[in-house]
Image: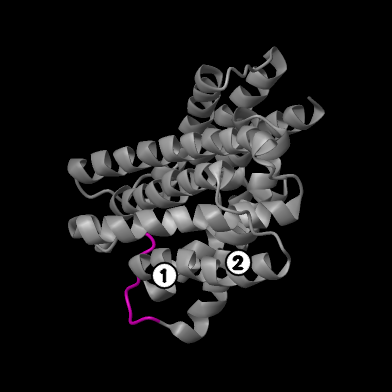
Amino acid sequence: MLTLVCWSISAVAVGRTAALLGATRASRLRLVAAFALLALPVIALGALIPPGPTAWWLLASGAIGLGLGDFAYFLGCARAGARLVTLIEQCAAVPIAALLEWWWLGGSLGGVEILACSLCVVGVAVALAPGSTVARTRADLWVGCAGGLVAAVGMAVSGVVTRQAVLVSATDGVDLGGPMAGLGAALWRILGGIAVVVAASALWPWLRLGVRQKTSRFAATVAPDWRRGWPWLLAATLGGPVLGVACYQWALVGAKAGPVLALLALVPVAVMPLTWAVEGDRPHPLAWVGAAVAVAGAVLIGLG
């Protein structure tokens, strides 16, 4: 639930940051700022996880989720709009994570968990379905859908890889329980994300997030407004890669990836009243029906 709150705030802040500073600049600065904000506190609090099997799995998790997944997400949003790409990412990540965890780690989902996950996915789908995309051509639509699917795979694989890090930590002598350890784990994940973003920018410049940015809902239409933009950048960083990821790591220590991602699929639903208040984006009436279904699934997860 803490992750849900953090990521919901971050989602709104990301939109405002990108509008004021530009999508390309905002996406890069968020990871760099997250590393700067995390490094000193992690070292000062003694939460630094030493290099070893646990750290390498966390690094891989960040490379897949914060690196590849976020890169694909922003690219997809730039071509087809955030509503469609978010729908694909959040709804597809849950079953992918559950199946991957079952195949790789031998986990399983009970009947109540399957029902709760299904309610969350269906609710989010109904809540986000109303409205059209900003895709101008069929190619933009396909690229956006592909970006959302890659982002979903990145989120799901990252969650399961993090669970693998938890299993390895038992024999590696690393305690991943509690929020302090979550900060240390978040730092390794951010390093993995930064490595992928740097590599992608260097090897595939034509995939930079600024390509066709004029079709993006997050594109800046004016010169960067640093005076108004930096507070939103700070909120996006703290709510996402810093506190949000720390709480996410904490959640995965004691819960399976499938139910955790199902609960986090409520992020787009939780964002609705925030965007209404901040941006005046009034949700479609059908969106509230989907929100009710999704919340029912979240409650079922909590009761289970």
Say the numbered circle drawn on residue 38. Answer: 2
Hey, which residue is sitting farthest right in the picture? 303
Q: CA distance from mark 2 to mark 1?
A: 25 Å
Residue range corresponding to the magenta coloring: 216-224
Q: Residue at x 69, y 35 (%)?
A: 170
Mark 2 Cα shell of 10 Å, populated few (<14), some (14-19), many (≥20): some
- Residue corresponding to mark 1: 19
Evaluate whether residue 216 shows in this view: no
Q: Tell me residue 253's x, y (percent).
A: 69, 38
**Are the residues tagged 2 and 1 within 8 Å (C-beta)?**
no
- Amino acid type at image mark 1: Ala
The amino acid pointed to by label 2 is Leu
Nearer-the-camera pick, 210 or 297: 210
Residue 42 figure quarter: bottom right
Question: In the structure shown, which secondary structural element does the residue marked by tag 2 occupy?
Answer: helix
Q: Nearer the viewer, mark 2 or mark 1?
A: 2
Say which quarter of the image contains residue 148.
top left
Give the quadrant of the C terminus: top right
In reply to whether residue 63 is colored magenta, the answer given is no
Q: Position of residue 243 (x, y in %)?
A: 65, 59
